[in-house]
Amino acid sequence: MNNKYSIYKIIKYRSGFLLLIFIVILILLVTFLISIASTMFSERQTGYRYGTIVDKAIRGKIISQDGYTLSFSEPKFEAQINTLSIDPTKKELFVKLFSIYSDIKESEVLERFQNKNGALIRGRISLSKNLSASQASRIKELNFKLKGLKVFRPLDETKPHLVFGLDVIAISENRRYPYENVLTPVVGYTQNEHQQNSNYLIPKAQKGLEKAYNPYIKPYSNGFVESKKDALGTVLRDGDSNYLQRVDGMDLYLNVPVNFQFLIEEIIDKAVYSLDAQEIMVGVMESKTGKIRALASTSRFNPEHILKKDVKRLNPHFAEYLYEPGSVIKPITMAIALENKKITTKDSIDVEGGVMEINKKYIIKDDEAFTTLTPEEILTHSSNIGIAKIAWRNSGAELFNGYSRWGLAKKSGIDLSIENVGRIKTAQQLDQITASGGSSYGYGMFVNFAQLLRAYSAFNNEGIMSTPQIVDYVKD
């Protein structure tokens, strides 16, 4: 009886043990199958991490009529390295090769490894913050070569597979003006500021064409590459990578040829000293089309290197500076009188021998003494008395409406970022002899240069004024 009980007990024990082993094997098998299924059906459970490389979009170019690039953007990069990741026995090789690839002297590279006290820095340093796109590409190429030469070593000996090398980081977009002060202040300038929620610096338009056309030439959207990263965090580009092309700002194509602009600037630069003038402005415009062929000022600056003395030169005075125009208004006053049929070209005007006293406070004088002059001779000899007498034949309302039709005290429409319109006397004021007399030869009113450029286009365009246009077109 006891033997049978013992055998039964042994069989029961073995059965339980076998059942336990079977359950364990079954659990392991199910776990293995789940792992296989997860690997097959889930791309992101492969052990890879995913990363993104951003390709920064940049501002468009400003290009002259004869094909010269007056303004363009280029990204700037920084090269960083952890000094502890360089094998001390191969530091000299690193410095020599980095100098060759970056165009930086070896002595300057070595200085980056030291603090202000001359002690070696143990940790991350910046080797250069002024690398161009081509230099940055060469440094990236160098990084792979240095890894192949075993120049870098792991920072943690327990993780020998983690070897970090050179880091090349985009830090800013720099605006370049290769022809320096040519066509300034018309071209305008920019100032770098931090992009929102980023340390990346981007140019912000301040004045001129840069500001006026900023909605067109500013960067539209960044591109990117999204793909797997290796153990070192390097984004791997392969067939499974996602790409989005960057969209840069549009380019501005001007009506102004640089060669002609430069010639005009050369001439007025010499004249401003001989005339002892504060500033000379010159505009050349096609009357029928309004296309600006030159817009030159002696008050220029280099947009890449703005100095304290340049502060007054930053504003394009062609549209922002208001002044009393003087005798250049006489042809417009004459045209108003002719249009209102107040005179004919054959009339003879008494010009009082060159001096006319209106009252004790108001005396009009001419530079030359004549008894009478025709309308044409009044303009030829620039007679203040003659043009004032012609103006007085018009009512205040006729003069006011006339000056307004000629675009005075109105925007010329020139494509700059700011335009100050100035002012003329009211119709009621122009009914007064002193106000209308002064206005007839350009005193007591304020205009800008672009308004006069537009007004004068009517004289050789069959009475039609053309809007001054610096930019011909914009293009992707």
Image (cartoon, helix red, strand yellow):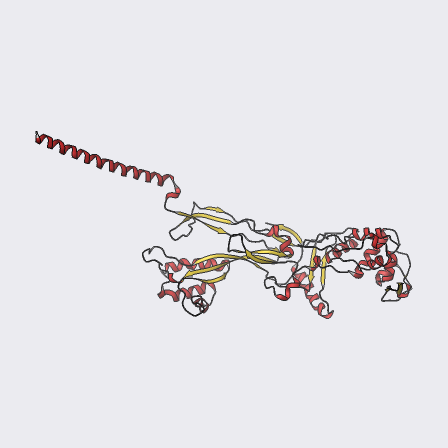
> Vertically, is 343 above or below 267?
above
Residue drawn at (68%, 59%) of the image: 316
Left or right for 49, reference 474? left
Which residue is at the front of the view, 362 or 164?
Answer: 362
Which quadrant does the N terminus fall into?
Answer: top left
- Residue 66, x across and y down, in percent: 64, 57
Looking at the image, which residue sits at the far top? Answer: 1
- Residue 270, x across and y down, in percent: 70, 68
- Residue 312, x across and y down, in percent: 66, 63
Residue drawn at (47%, 66%) of the image: 104
Residue drawn at (62%, 66%) of the image: 308
Q: Quadrant of residue 392?
A: bottom right
Residue 8 in view here: yes
Q: How many numbered marks have been drawn onto this rendered protein structure?
A: 0
Looking at the image, which residue sits at the far front? Answer: 2
Left or right for 399, reference 119? right
Left or right for 108, reference 444? left
Residue 183 in view here: no
Which residue is at the front of the view, 470 or 424?
Answer: 424
- Residue 203, x across and y down, in percent: 57, 56
Residue drawn at (66%, 63%) of the image: 313
